[in-house]
Image (spheres, coloured by chain):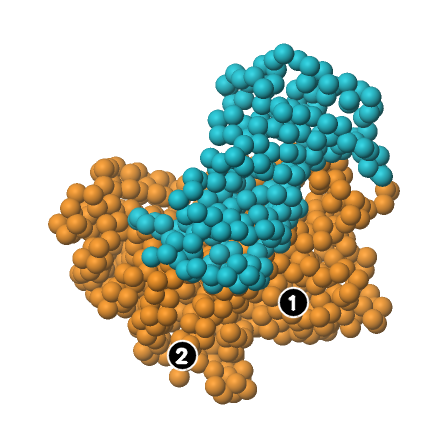
Amino acid sequence: MPLPLTASEIEARLERILPTVDKPGRYAGGELNRVLKPWDSVSAHVALVFPDIYDIGLANLGLAILYDILNRRPDVAAERAYAPWLDLETILRRDGIPLFSLESKHPLASFDIIGITLPYETIYTNTLNILDLAGLPLRSAERNETHPLVIAGGHAAYNPEPMSAFIDAFVIGEGEGVILEIVDAWQAWKTSAGSRADLLAALAHIEGVYVPSFYQVSYHPDGRVADFKPIHPAAPSTITKRIVPQLPPPLTRFLVPSVEVVHNRIAIEIMRGCSRGCRFCQAGMVNRPVRERPVEQILNAMQEAVHATGYEDIGLLSLSSSDYTQILKLTEEANRRFAGAHLTISLPSLRIESFSAELMDNLKDCRASGGFTLAPEAATERMRQIINKPLPAGQLLDTARTVFEHGWTSLKLYFMIGHPSETLEDVQEIIETCYQVLRIGQKIRGGRVKVHAGVSTFVPKPHTPFQWVSCDSVDQINAKLNLLKQGLRHQNLRLTWNEPPGTQLEAWLTRGDRRTGEVILRAWQKGAKFDAWRDQFRFEIWQEAYAEAGIDPAFYSHRQRELDEILPWDHINTGVSKNYLKQDYQWSLDGRSRPDCAVQCAACGILSSLGDLRMQFPNTQWKCP
Amino acid sequence: MTVYRLRITFAKTAPLRYTSHLDMMHVWERTLRRSGLPIAYSKGFNPGPRIHQGCSLPLGFTSQQEMVDIFLDDVLAIDAVRSALQEAVPPGIELGAIEEIDPKAPALQTQVQSSTYIATLLDPVNPAELKASLQSLLAAPALPRTWREKAYDLRPLIHSLTLLPASSGGQLSFEMHLSAREGAMARPEEVLSAMGFSPHAARVERTKILLA
Ligand code: SF4
């Protein structure tokens, strides 16, 4: 076997290759605020990987935070790698060049730890592709002491089972606290010269780390899980997610790319978690409890970040920004402090009902040209009770009126179709609502008003009250989409929607089990990658892959589960109890909504799962009682 | 309001070699914002920092001499500007001279006359053959070529081509002095390809920009 290429050999090859590929700046590294440590000056090398191209991955806040935390440690170097675009991949494979990190151009295989983020399911085949481009065996079981440890986290990891054959250990929950513990464990293992199994055992002892090979699943003949149990003494029977009890000051030294990418901006999380409890929303369930950052801390971070990056755009992020208790103060102060600084401050995810005219006034000074977005998700009262996104009658129209009165001329409305028990009448109401909003806008701002309906399709997610339900059939979805397409034909209305095949793949994968891993592998072998890219996605590959594996994908997407069924992700504890989810699901069947838990605690389980942490940090700003 | 115009000469080195002319505009905007200098903004719906870039440098090239004009609302000592910028420039920009320019002087781009480049061939070439090839280009009465579907004559845009002594590593390089006037700009890749080389056969660095 030829010797693996060194970093300087890879760099020399790239010298000739990069000028021939599209957008070579993606692979150059060398951005402002990147950290490059001499390779031999540290004892642990971590490659952080976003399994899609640089343009999309660079702005990922989770990885950016881990990059910062790791690089603050003098004995650790964190570098980055992304999926190469198809043109470079072809050349790398042709010339036998392994995938490399952007900073030092070391091959990924020479790192000690590879940390992969899995933000959504349609990134799974890219993940396998990256392991393959790195020259690593894909299956965890086939890797040994000479290979890097491969870990993964991110939202899709809340159901780790589909990727469990390929990942050595998953981080469940927030990586900030746990990443250094993993590095410590790796360093201790390295000095002890232990086996791969020793390393995995050490990791399994860390709270929030899931080592899939230490568990065994058996299935009923029909495919349901019959039993799931630990088979290693180090393995806990459930893995409780990790959180940071108190949000640390936000990241301010963002990487500033030298080429334009998606979301070139400062991103500051003002609050983590959401108390609303929309039943379709996984993020709302898995990110509890709600923790806010103090206003002063946010303002200082904005200032520091502008100084460190020179960015002109600042996004103040959270799942529901207008629920941040100090939102008026924050926006007022921001306007005052940054007056005349030519900054664009945006506040995505505003709740329709917690949104005031005052807040609108504060936003006016820093409004983005992009228009305004509201997310009613459903258009009928009945439907909104079922999904638990209640909205007093008329509120949406009132808020829309305020938006137009404050000078905006375009409004985007997010809806979701395919909710449990949704009918064509419910969908028809989406059309009516769009026209009502348009008429209001035109009355106030005249003929140039535009209303944009962004319609996605509901996919039941693990760890939500809808984790048991079946998806709408493909025929139903098509009928609903056709209704919308016909009903929203108007020069001032725009409709965008998700194509059903992509949604379907997401539905197959998100509630998948360990057998799904074989399908992912097969799909990748048959050429699937960049599944999240509309122009690259090949649905027929996936259909074939499921067929060849002898698995009916509808088992995962179009099957109502019994409440007592063992779900493939039941061993993952997000803090919200299964009993709570069951009750909440029952309430949805009864058409009963649940109040915002910031108003009235619903005893979701967070306090019994994670309450101890709060004792240790008495100053935490949890919004739980 | 005072408008203070400064011409910054800088080297564009490896970390920015794949950053396009358009993206360099963003690089400068952000550099200025980081510097905390009192930058002048353009008027209009979407105001941005006022910056004039010099002539564009093809993707992949490095340069010993690039130029950009910036506009400030306040008059500051050049040294103060330099130290503010020094702190703020990203990897890939090395500051050179900074000088005051008459705010009413024409746009930088229109003042550029010509540029010199050094092309270093990546693969071994016979020096005698290379020399002959350079000479035959210079001796040609015309070099008809097309760029983006437009026919033009490359020859009058070439001022000189000179073979340089081989490097210690044995790589051969030559210098080109080419017209860079607006509308009469010769591209180093075009010279390479007129000589029968692929545009990727050489590493090219701009060495000088000559102004009117
Ligand atoms: S414990 Fe109560 S307040 Fe806290 S997240 Fe759960 S329901 Fe909401």
Q: Is residue A400 above or below residue B185?
A: below
Residue found at x 40% / y 79%? A623
Residue found at x 63% / y 74%? A207
Give me the disc on residue A70. Answer: 1
Q: Position of residue A228 (x, y in %)?
A: 62, 65
Query: What is the secondary structure assignment of the residue under circle 2?
Result: loop
Q: Position of residue A475 (x, y in %)?
A: 37, 40
> Which image quadrant: the C terminus of chain A?
bottom left
- Quarter of the image for residue A593 reads bottom left
Q: Are marks 1 and 2 in contact (CB under 8 Å)?
A: no
The amino acid type, in three-letter code, at marker 2 is Lys
The colour one sees for chain B in the rendered image is cyan
- Determine which residue is flagged by label 2: A623
Q: Position of residue B188 (x, y in %)?
A: 63, 29
Return the chain for callout 1: A
Q: Position of residue A457 (x, y in %)?
A: 38, 49
Asked if ligand 1 lies within 8 A of label 2, the reply is: yes
